[in-house]
């Protein structure tokens, strides 16, 4: 007979950790739940950091719950400012940076990721910023309000959303992207070009196919010989898992912490969810880390259910969205290494691009057609196989593919 589960510890108090704690109580778990977070804040969702908080000068952070509600309503022990830095799989303990030790019967690693640093800028004297937490967002917002000359390194979602906010506030913005186009891993060229044109119409400049080699107080030096004047540099070149606790528990963590469909790691009674989890994606045909709001929430809820004895496989297709000026762009599944079908009139600014490998729908991207994306996500999740001719026709009702 399995030993009773009395103590669940969640290492990480971000969105995944917070939603997992909620789900444990919603599923009727009565034991102790302890959530340990590095930041001084209770759990919150990160998309607001590059969206609402940058676009509104007085927007404050929206928390999943206020700090007191975790204890008073959910009976969850929330410890902020308590980074988990050590763990012992045999003793079933984790230790925080201030030396406290916590015993677990089940452990959920939800420590997320940290920004990749740009070594070429370190020690240059120019102001360098990253955008990963509340303090980062507030700092960048203050810079934007001063109409700074801003160089953004990285033409991904975070960099482009920051560029949008800065341009709207009158800043002079230059985006440096080492690829030949924007978001090459997620967008087809058609949409990359559309987004670049939209940014240019708001005064944003781009330098493609170049990397940052250094900086002075005057600006940023590039591999193509250019120097871009700047008051500050925002670096958005991706993230990497926070490795410490996984390594201490004997779990390989380079590239992510491997989990099965139920969120179990190789260590007994240790689970992982959120940005740090290396999970199988049918759409991609390989294990990937999914760095999205939806995954941080939905996978964490599913894994929490499995931690208390249920068996619920999580296999939702990856999905994210970005709002830039008047563009709402959503991406589901995988858009790479596939045939693309354009559904709708791209000149209207409202269309979808569907990715297929053979007869499989493995991805979709929508521009200003959120309702259509909602159906496309269901088609991808159901592994439905509508014909190419049907998908190409805007008159085709996508609900028919689910019957």
Image (cartoon, helix red, strand yellow):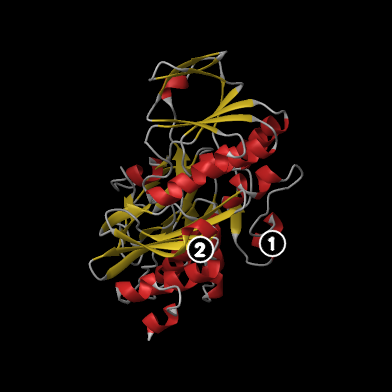
Q: Is residue 340 above or below residue 28?
A: above
Looking at the image, which residue is at 57% across and 13% down?
Answer: 218
Residue 20 tag number: 2
Tally of numbered tags: 2
Measured as percent of width and height from the top left, residue 230 is found at 58, 21
Q: Tell me: 146 left or right of 28.
A: right
Measured as percent of width and height from the top left, residue 130 is found at 54, 34
Residue 69 tag number: 1
Q: Secondary structure at mark 1?
A: helix
Around disc 2, counting alpha carbons within 10 Å, would you say few (fewer than 14), some (14 to 19), or many (20 or more)? many
Q: Tell me: 13 left or right of 315.
A: right
Q: From this viewpoint, which residue is outermost toward the bottom?
A: 403
Q: Is residue 17 visible?
A: no
* Residue 68, picture quadrant: bottom right
Measured as percent of width and height from the top left, residue 99 is found at 51, 39
Q: Earlier in the sequence, mark 2 or mark 1?
A: 2
Looking at the image, which residue is at 70% across and 57% down?
Answer: 66
* Observer-nearest of 174 and 30: 174
Q: Quadrant of the N terminus?
A: bottom left
Q: Is residue 49 visible?
A: yes
Marks 2/1: CA–CA distance:
15 Å
* Observer-nearest of 161 and 314: 161
* Residue 76, picture quadrant: bottom right
């Amino acid at each position: 007979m399995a030993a009773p589960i009395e103590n669940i510890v969640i290492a990480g108090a971000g969105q995944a950790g917070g939603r997992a704690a909620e789900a444990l109580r919603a599923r009727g778990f009565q034991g102790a739940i302890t959530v340990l977070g590095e930041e001084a804040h209770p759990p919150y969702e990160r998309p607001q950091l590059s969206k609402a908080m940058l676009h509104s000068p007085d927007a404050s952070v929206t928390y999943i719950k206020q700090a007191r509600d975790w204890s008073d309503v959910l009976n969850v022990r929330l410890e902020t400012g308590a980074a988990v830095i050590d763990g012992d799989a045999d003793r079933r303990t984790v230790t925080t940076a201030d030396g406290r030790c916590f015993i677990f019967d089940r452990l959920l690693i939800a420590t997320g990721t940290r920004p990749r640093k740009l070594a070429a800028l370190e020690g240059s004297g120019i102001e360098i910023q990253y955008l990963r937490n509340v303090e980062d967002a507030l700092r960048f917002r203050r810079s934007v309000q001063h109409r700074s000359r801003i160089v953004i390194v990285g033409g991904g979602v975070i960099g482009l959303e920051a560029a949008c906010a800065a341009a709207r506030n009158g800043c002079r913005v230059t985006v440096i992207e080492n690829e030949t186009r924007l978001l090459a891993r997620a967008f087809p060229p058609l949409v990359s070009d559309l987004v670049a044109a939209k940014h240019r119409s708001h005064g944003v400049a781009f330098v493609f196919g170049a990397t940052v080699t250094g900086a002075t107080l005057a600006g940023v030096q590039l591999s193509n010989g250019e120097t871009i004047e700047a008051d500050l540099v925002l670096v958005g070149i991706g993230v990497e898992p926070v490795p410490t606790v996984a390594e201490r528990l004997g779990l390989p963590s380079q590239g992510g912490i491997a989990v099965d469909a139920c969120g179990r790691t190789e260590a007994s009674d240790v689970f992982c969810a959120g940005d740090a989890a290396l999970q199988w994606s049918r759409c991609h045909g390989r294990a990937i880390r999914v760095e999205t709001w939806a995954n941080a929430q939905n996978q964490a809820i599913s894994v929490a259910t499995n931690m208390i004895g249920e068996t619920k496989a999580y296999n939702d297709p990856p999905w994210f969205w970005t709002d830039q000026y008047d563009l709402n762009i959503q991406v589901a599944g995988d858009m790479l290494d596939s045939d693309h079908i354009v559904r709708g009139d791209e000149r209207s600014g409202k269309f979808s691009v569907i990715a297929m490998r053979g007869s499989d729908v493995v991805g979709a991207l929508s521009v200003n057609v959120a309702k259509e994306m909602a159906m496309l996500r269901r088609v991808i999740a159901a592994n439905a196989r509508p014909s190419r001719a049907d998908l190409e026709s805007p008159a085709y009702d996508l609900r028919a593919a689910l019957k």
